Amino acid sequence: MTNGNFKKPSTRNQKKQAILDAAEKIFAEYGFKGATTQMIADFAGIPKANLHYYFPTKEALYSQVVQNIFDIWLEAADSFDQNMDPAIALASYINKKMEISRAHPNGSKVWANEVMHGAPIIQDYLETTLKEWTTSREAVIQSWIDEGRMDKIDPKHLLYMIWATTQHYADFVHQVQTLNDGQPFDDGAWQAATRDVKKIILAGVGLQTGGDDGDH
Amino acid sequence: MTNGNFKKPSTRNQKKQAILDAAEKIFAEYGFKGATTQMIADFAGIPKANLHYYFPTKEALYSQVVQNIFDIWLEAADSFDQNMDPAIALASYINKKMEISRAHPNGSKVWANEVMHGAPIIQDYLETTLKEWTTSREAVIQSWIDEGRMDKIDPKHLLYMIWATTQHYADFVHQVQTLNDGQPFDDGAWQAATRDVKKIILAGVGLQTGGDDGDH
DNA sequence: AACCCATCTGACCATTTGGTCAAGTTTTAT
DNA sequence: ATAAAACTTGACCAAATGGTCAGATGGGTT
């Protein structure tokens, strides 16, 4: 067993990841101030002092959680690079964003919290990485418009609509569930939501949806 | 006699309103836990003890702020009652929601925060008032669909898309502003955003937008 | 065995904060 | 004028919380 050299780093990273997972959930549920390091430590099953051994301050832990989420967001961006057809690219992007909302609702909430409070921790990311990503995608969408392949709208607002709508199912999951007779979405409900979101947005910019949606 | 000789209801209410205004801003910026009664009192220009004379607990003050916002949301609901044409009704509703996002961004943020954290304070409102409102509007939209006046989608998801998108411009105003070269939206930017949101959503459900939008 | 070093933890502390209270001050009613 | 009621506020407190620290534990190396 134990592959010689790297026995510790793996367990160390496992433990750090367990703390990060606990932190994501607690931060999402209670906000930065509302969450306590004691709660996170309890949820991770370790003493508080041990948590502070791996993450010296609450803010360092929080910052790591936010950055992890940001990376997940960016992964969904590939859609725009690989597909040249606007209908397929947008459908694929919406698919991925909906899947993230379902798989990582807590991450989405932490991100929303951070931005709503003025992005005190990740302002740099907004101004650099997110700004660059957004600018380049706007250019792609604009080129589709210029080529007459979709209706003329400001690409910025199309992106905001996609972000807002897909993340709504994560950030407002409690409200959505309450209005769904208190039941969480099942597979069918998620598929229906994804289908309707794609339908409205694609048709909204003049891209008729065929029988398929461009992603598996 | 000398029953409840309410001296100056006007000044009393004025002061309560001033506290509520301060509270809305501070709660929006720092969240429930992050906001302190001291901050709110300072912002309202009164001693903390005086704030607690009008609102016995922090939670009572917060609860009042959330309920006030909820009432504002509901006011925008009239669109659906008065207009029978789906394009005009939806356009008018979107117009009002965008105006609220511009006029009351802090209220929207407090609401978002509350719902994201599981609606501990206003769960009753979600289950009763909001549930009833949503159900009745879904029925209206469904009737339009049944009459073949708009495309077939689940009315629920259309409503969520309108909420998510319009509130995005309030809740994520910091991100939107950062991506807008650090500049807040001016009149033109708000008009453009409102126009594009209406365009995509109306066209998205098969309602062609004519030259006008149904509201001034 | 002897040593090193990463990891772990109970006990502890300084600061923050929601809320109280008693002592004032102002307004209203008689 | 006088009493009562409403309002204001500085000082204070108990509880919660982020973070520290000295000492313990355990695995690996020589």
Image: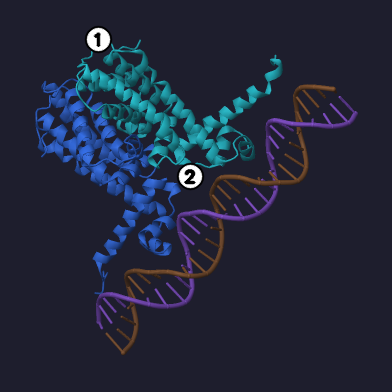
Chain colours: A cyan, B blue, C purple, D brown
10 Å crowding of disc 1: few (<14), some (14-19), many (20+): few
Residue drawn at x 39%, y 56% is B40
Up-down relation of residue B138 to residue A140 (above or below) = below
Residue drawn at x 23%, y 43% is B100
- Front residue of B34 and A181: B34
Disc number at residue A33?
2
Callout 2: residue from which chain? A
Tell me the amino acid under the disc marked 1.
Answer: Gly
Q: Is residue D18 left or right of residue A195?
A: right
Count of picture labels: 2
Tell me residue B171's x, y (percent).
33, 39
Instruction: Name which quarter of the figure residue A78 lies in.
Output: top left
- Front residue of A144 and B5: A144
Tell me the amino acid under the disc marked 2.
Answer: Lys
Up-down relation of residue B116 to residue A193 (above or below) = below
Q: Is residue A90 left or right of residue B192?
A: right
Tell me residue A187's x, y (percent).
36, 19
Tell me residue A193's x, y (percent).
30, 22
Tell me residue D30's x, y (percent).
85, 22
- Chain-order first, disc 1 or disc 2: 2
Up-down relation of residue B119 to residue A187 (above or below) = below
10 Å crowding of disc 2: few (<14), some (14-19), many (20+): some
Give how far apart the Cα atoms at labels 1 and 2 are: 47 Å
Residue named by callout 1:
A211
Q: Secondary structure at mark 1?
A: loop
- Front residue of C4 and B146: C4
